[in-house]
Structures are given as C-alpha cells and as structure tokens.
Image: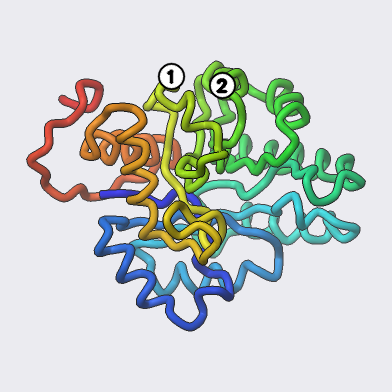
Amino acid sequence: MLIDSHNHIYAEQFNDDLEEVMNRASEAGVQHLLMPNIDVPSIDAMHRVADRYPDRCYPMMGLHPCSVQEDFREQLSVVERHLFQPVRKYIAVGEIGIDLYWDKSTLEIQQEAFRQQIEWAKALKLPIVIHVRESFDEVFEIVDELHDERLRGVFHCFTGTLEQAKHIEAYGSFMMGIGGVLTFKNGKIDQFIHELDLNRLILETDSPYLAPKPYRGKRNEPAYTRLVAEKLSTLTGKSLEEIEAVSTANCERLFHLTFEHEASSAPLPDHLDG
C-alpha cells in the first residue's frame, strides 16, 4: 500500500474525471490521499472530495503562503474557526510556510501567518505541512525558534541540499516529502537521497503539479506516487516493498493515522518487524 501524502485532488483540474483518477490510484496501490488546503475559497471543494471518499481522502486546514495577501488576517480567522471549532477532523495544519519565488514583498506577512499557524498546530497537537520555495533560511529561522516537543511535521516537496536535509533530520520530529522532482535530471536530490534516513521520508505527488518522468509537464495525479517509490527504490538500493512499508509507516506515525494493510509476502524491514 502506498500513501500520497500531499495532493490537491480537489483542484479544478480533476473536475471532469475524478472517479477515473481515483480508480487509477487504486490500481497503482495508492489507497490513501492526504489533502492540504490552499485558502478559504478552496475549503468547500476539499470538503466535497473528503465527503465523497471518506475512507481514502483526508483533509488538512491551513493558508498557503502564496495566498497570504492583504486579506490574510481575515482568511486566517476562517482557518482558525475550522481548526478550533471543527465539524470534521483535520489531520494537519497545512499547507503553510514561506514562498519567495513568486513575491518577496510579502515576506513579513508570510512570516506572521506561518508563526500563527505553527502555534495553532502546537496547541492542537497536529503536525504542520511546510511549503518552502527559495526560503529555507527564512523557514529554518522560524522553525528553529518555535521547535519544541509539541512540533512535528513535513517539509513538503523537498528540493533542498544535503546540508538542508540534515538540518531537517536533526529536528527529530520532521519528515521530508519526496515527489516527482526525484525523477528529474536537474532535480539534484537524486544525487544524495541514499544518504538520508529512510525513516524520515514520505512519498507525495503534489498533484496536479510536478508530475514525474515520463509525464513531466503534464497533469500529475496520485497514481504516480508509485513512480516516485520506484525511483526511490532504485536510488537507495532498497526493495520496492521496503519503500512501500517504510513510507507508509512514516506517514501513519507523522499524521497519527492507522490503516489496514494488505497482506504481503515481502518481509518487513527490521525496524518494523515485531
């Protein structure tokens, strides 16, 4: 069983064929999909998908850094209301973080939104799902400051350096989300992924974005989680069965989820056995 730990399956790109996309995911062994929120307008669409597939799709709640604009405090108030007076369960606070690729002028308010949502996650004992784009230093500054025994999460779509990966591992309570970039020739993380602790890695697609080879440039979808798993298996020298078992266990541990696992003839890795 595979888990796509980060996708926007509720996006309009899937309006016409969502059922077929979900069926392809099942056929690829991708049974569970974790969905981070983007902004207030995206909440209803995310909820509709979660209601349509309650045993497969799990929502998060947060304000994406690219959505942090002049009205961000109003949007944060809606996020807060959903988190603290929920009509449903959210598995994480996300997608949150800092993005300096699109707009550097909003850094100060992005930092404010990021800090606030981290504090909410700590109060609720939920993990955070961090978006980092051209902003590792800025994100590390805040996480270093606020990190304590209550803070855990994942650096989604990790595309950093080995040094940055080791910084994340040193927290002891954070994972790295590995997606389609792992299959890119210029992705760079393929050069050192074998040096990382497999117990700190989870798989994702970020659908509909960042499709892996051979679908690069096309719409991404959860079924392609298997392509990421296969690439990770090749680069680490671990069997595909071990990649599946470990990444699924990591997801369950991080998000406090428990799924029924299909029987497999493949041996469990030592740290999962018994």
Secondary structure state at the residue bearing disc 1? helix
- At x 88%, y 47%, the residue is 106
Would you place residue 94 above or below residue 54 in this image?
A: above
- At x 7%, y 40%, the residue is 265
**Which of the 4 image quarters holds residue 115?**
top right
The tag on residue 36 is: none
Query: How far, Cα to Cα, is label 1 from label 2?
Result: 8 Å
Q: How crowded is mark 1: few (under 14 residues within 10 Å), some or many (20 or more)?
A: few
Of 194 and 56, the residue lying toward us: 194
- At x 70%, y 26%, the residue is 140
The tag on residue 162 is: 2
Residue type for callout 2: Leu
Q: Which residue occupies the extreme front position in the image?
A: 185
Give the image location of residue 186, x and y in percent: 57, 39
Residue type for callout 1: Glu
Give the image location of residue 255, x and y in percent: 44, 42
| Residue 217 seen from this side | yes
Secondary structure state at the residue bearing disc 2? helix
Would you place residue 79 above or below residue 261 in this image?
A: below
Give the image location of residue 239, x and y in percent: 22, 33
Q: Do the residues labelled 1 and 2 touch (CB within 8 Å)?
A: yes
Residue 180 left/right relative to 115: left
Q: How crowded is mark 2: few (under 14 residues within 10 Å), some or many (20 or more)?
A: some
The tag on residue 195 is: 1
Q: Which residue occupies the extreme bottom position in the image?
A: 16
